[in-house]
């Protein structure tokens, strides 16, 4: 079942989870709706790609440890293989004018998709003046080159501690700012020679701390591979996100694309393993704890803070990448049209990306 979904599940995490519910609740009746919702709440409390973690949870419930591995691997593997095919073509033929024009049309569409996702997520993440202030502060500090992981945990801790201030005062803790001192350390941009071990560890780190939608992956890969290590350009990063968006399965397979660009097939395998491995570990640890964790005021407020922080990071990278992809009136118009279509119609984003590719080729034919 998950192998088939891995080949056919287009449309992002929400669509993936809808397809899984149809399979495991309605058709096969493996889980009740309430149990499925409990799992959905649990995957929002741990880092990693939500739809992939749902597949891992369901596999674990049905068949224990073997099911945990098979469920997740079968959902990831098809997307990984398809992305490797795209990456091979990209590396081989990126100098061809046709591919450049294809990406010329796809990139602004992807920017429109990300902008619409940012708006939709913002309405859910910004639930109070506190979360609005934290999100805006993170956006400002991101452009001041503060470390994105420090910002992620700092924002989560601020919201968690502020909302539970009464409990802290009851225990004699008076100063929240002192608890947060030293969290916001500026990120240092240092060029590092490429190595497969560093590639694996970088994606392992990202997979272990990344909350929120797969689009937040943009912020972490920008900070790690463009700003800090200097292995990619912003253009290459946007190409990787575009390929992850147009293929079925988790958007996190953009890591596969990056790994192949940097280190060939071994790089693709190690990047994929690095970014998805933490999800298997977190699901194995959290599955027995779901009944207690989902009702914890500390865990829920921490998640609210992490979500709005992720949103601030995502907004920062969207503004950065927009400068690289919206380069003339046509690309700006294409991005705006994408946003309008997404707000007015419920349409699979794959069709929009296909339309962007066609538009890019048409422009190339007319010039």
Image (cartoon, rainbow, N blue to C red):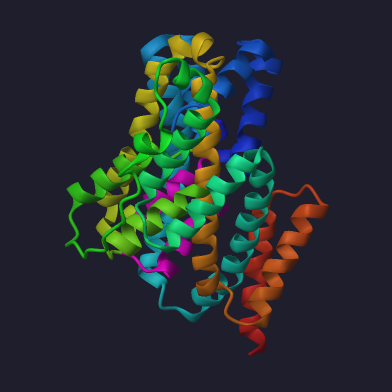
Q: Is residue 236 highlighted in magenta?
A: yes
Q: Is residue 220 visible?
A: yes
In screen coordinates, is 41 left or right of 62? right
Whole-percent x and y of residue 360? Answer: 62, 75
For residue 324, above or below residue 212: below
In screen coordinates, is 54 left or right of 89? right
Residue found at the far bottom of this picture: 367
In screen coordinates, is 358 left or right of 169? right
Whole-percent x and y of residue 334? Answer: 69, 71
Q: Residue at x 27, y 51 (%)?
A: 267
Which quadrant would the C terminus be assigned to in this image? bottom right
Whole-percent x and y of residue 284? Answer: 38, 17
For residue 192, above or below residue 254: below
Depth check: 130 or 235 in front? 130
Q: Is residue 126 visible?
A: no
For residue 334, above or below residue 32: below
Q: Residue at x 33, y 63 (%)?
A: 227
From the image, give the main secondary structure of the stretch colored magenta.
Answer: helix
Q: Residue at x 40, y 72 (%)?
A: 93
Query: Which region of the structure is painted magenta?
Result: 232-258
Residue found at the far right of this picture: 344
Whole-percent x and y of residue 269? Answer: 30, 44
Q: Is residue 205 highlighted in magenta?
A: no
Depth check: 171 or 190 in front? 171
Q: Quadrant of residue 270?
A: top left
Q: Residue at x 61, y 68 (%)?
A: 108
In screen coordinates, is 127 left or right of 182? right
């Amino acid at each position: 079942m998950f192998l088939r979904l891995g080949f056919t599940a287009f449309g992002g995490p929400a669509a993936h989870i809808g397809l899984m519910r149809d399979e495991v609740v309605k058709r096969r009746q493996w889980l009740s709706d309430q149990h499925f919702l409990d799992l959905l709440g649990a995957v929002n409390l741990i880092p990693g790609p939500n739809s992939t973690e749902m597949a891992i949870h369901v596999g674990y419930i049905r068949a224990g440890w073997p099911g945990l591995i098979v469920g997740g691997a079968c959902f990831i593997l098809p997307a990984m293989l398809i992305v490797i095919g795209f990456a091979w073509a990209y590396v081989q033929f990126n100098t061809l004018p046709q591919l450049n024009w294809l990406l010329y049309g796809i990139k602004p569409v992807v920017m429109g998709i990300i902008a619409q996702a940012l708006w939709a997520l913002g309405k859910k993440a910004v639930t109070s003046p506190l979360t609005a202030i934290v999100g805006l502060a993170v956006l400002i500090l991101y452009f001041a080159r503060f470390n994105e992981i420090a910002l992620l945990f700092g924002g989560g801790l601020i919201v968690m501690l502020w909302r539970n201030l009464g409990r802290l005062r009851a225990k004699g803790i008076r100063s929240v700012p002192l608890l947060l001192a030293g969290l916001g350390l500026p990120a240092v941009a240092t060029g590092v020679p490429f190595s497969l071990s560093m590639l694996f560890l970088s994606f392992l780190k990202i997979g272990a701390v990344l909350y929120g939608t797969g689009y937040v992956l943009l912020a972490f890969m920008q900070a790690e591979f463009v700003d800090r290590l200097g292995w990619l350009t912003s253009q290459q990063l946007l190409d990787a996100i575009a390929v992850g968006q147009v293929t079925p399965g988790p958007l996190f397979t953009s890591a596969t694309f990056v790994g192949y660009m940097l280190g060939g097939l071994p790089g693709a395998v190690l990047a994929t393993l690095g970014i998805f491995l933490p999800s298997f570990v977190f699901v194995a640890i959290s599955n027995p704890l779901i009944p207690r964790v989902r009702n914890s005021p500390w865990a829920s407020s921490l998640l609210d803070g992490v979500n709005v922080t992720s949103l601030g990071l995502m907004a920062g990278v969207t503004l950065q990448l927009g400068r690289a992809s919206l380069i003339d009136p046509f690309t700006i118009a294409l991005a705006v049209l994408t946003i309008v279509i997404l707000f007015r119609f419920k349409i699979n984003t794959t069709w929009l990306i296909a339309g962007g590719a066609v538009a890019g080729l048409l422009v190339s034919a007319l010039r």
